[in-house]
Image: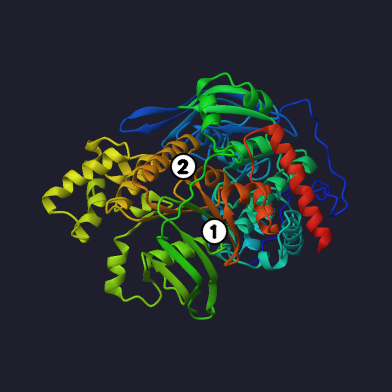
Amino acid sequence: MTTEPNDNKKSAPSDRFATSRFGRKLVQRGDDEPIIEVENLAVDFWVNGKWVNAARDISYSVRPGEVLAIVGESGSGKTVTSMSLLSLLPGNSRSTGHVRLHGQEILGIPMDELHRIRGNRIAVIFQEPMTAFNPVYRIGFQIVEALRTHFALTPAEATARAIELLELVEMPDPKKAFASFPHQLSGGQRQRAMIAMAISCDPDLLIADEPTTALDVTIQAEILDLLRSLHTRLNSAIIIITHDLGVVADIADNIIVMREGSIVERGTVDEVFNHAQHDYTKQLLAAVPHLGLEAGGERMTSTEEPVLTLTNASVDYPGHGRVPAFRAVDSVSFEIRPGEVVGLVGESGSGKTTVGRSIVGLLPFTEGSAKLLGKDLVGIKPDQLREVRRSIGIVFQDPGSSLNPRWPVGQSIGEPLELANAVEKAKIGTRVEELLDAVELPRSFRNRYPHELSGGQRQRIGIARALALNPKLLIADEPTSALDVSVQARVLDLLERLQKELQFACLFISHDLAVIDRLADRILVMNLGELVEQGPADEILRNPQHPYTKRLIAAVPVPDPDEQRKRRDARAALLAAEGRRK
């Protein structure tokens, strides 16, 4: 049954969605008074019969048109403090202090009053829209529901407004997206839909929790452009929670740096980046890979026989039901020599992970030639594949899900040794301890379970397991994308050291060009299943030839506000020039 609008809901703010696209005049808010004021905020959790403090003495204010970035590593308290503004924390939490919205206290107010603020006055853009959207309802239904909760709109009016919002966030096909389920949209499209829902009620404050972490660099750049444009046109405030200092340099006005639940530094973006005072802030800045930092560095060259050679190799995905078969990798050719690190880059759907999975034998090559240590992987028999796999190690993107949660990590490290009968059973324990030494973890960790380790420690365990059989080729599939910057830096240092010591060939798959710049001797660029450019790292990153490579490099944010402004302008000019050519 259709619910008619009731008199308790306010009229739709037809003039508040002001954009040049729709020709409406924007209602300007005053710039003097803060939208949100946080004073001495503290957050505690009731754990094992006692209160455990997660954040303390948090104070800040955000005015109209400002972007405040809250940065810090996992566990620093940046997300819990922001979610506490709307009481979005679990039931075992408590928040004390003051949170004022336009001067009115909202911390601890009755839930019915809070419901009128959520989504209406303060909206949240969550990190993973796939889990934030209800998977059984279409995108349009969920946006319409948000609109009709707060405004007196008929179903037809709410539908028109929802499609207008999807156009506002530059959704490629708004009407199709409106009728789609969340799983039918790409990651970037889901994030655009999440932003459309967040701005549907023209909120005074947007809280963006890691809004670009899971996105490719070009999609990330588009989302940041969109947020920058929207907050300027709507004159709203933004609190962006992130550990990506390149994103901070690109969009923020002011920064708060958090560590272990406290603010250790604050200031304008220029002050913090150029004149950091606290040692922790300096460490964070130093840990960030910087595109271009390795220019002119010594790169590996090898004349030895290749470990891996692909010649016109293709991979097809078979059809399932109504989904037709399609070619995921088309005629890819490259080689990797001993001691060489080759970076494989591209956006989601480019085919880079498919290449890695096919080399390991998790997917079959359907055409061409793929030779590993002289053995052709195309049409290889299972018993031969098992033998070849002893020469390959793989480090997965998510170490948590790649380790058996029921096993101590020492058993996970030793499993390849046992399956391959590489050493006597009595000596497996000794080899496990040697591998823990190699990845710089205490030997006592062999008895711990994955959930007892941090993300960086789990990834070190993943590396130890991958190196257990002394592989000739290591495939690292986005091994640092889920890690904080300082943890990422330590894992990269470890990989770099081990690769130089053991001289294995490495295919490093990533969408982070700054990481690739640091590690790779050569770079392969993939787009839509094809290898569009390859060459020495310095040549690809400093003098790209293919338009796609140029767009990819231009989209990478760097942790330097002045340089990032120049890069943003250069990217806009590049895209404009391509648009004119089209």
Asked if residue 11 shows in the view, the reply is: no
For mark 1, give the secondary structure. Answer: loop
Characterize the local packing of mark 2: few (<14), some (14-19) or many (20 or more) Cα atoms within 10 angstroms.
many
Please give the count of numbered marks on the rendered protein: 2
**Image quadrant where residue 568 sits:** top right
Mark 1 or mark 2, earlier in chain = 1
Of the 4 image quadrants, the one containing the C terminus is bottom right
Discs 1, 2 touching: Cβ within 8 Å: no
Q: Is residue 109 above or below residue 567?
A: above
Q: Is residue 258 above or below residue 556?
A: above
Mark 2 sits on what residue?
A: 483
Look at the numbered disc 2 and give the secondary structure of its residue: loop
In terms of depth relative to the viewer, which is nearer, 313 or 77?
313
Residue 429 placement, left or right of 168: left
Amino acid type of the residue tagged 2 in the rendering: Leu
Judging by the rendered image, the residue that carries numbered circle 1 is 134
- In space, the residues marked 1 and 2 are separated at their CA atoms by 27 Å
> Is 573 in front, or is 264?
573
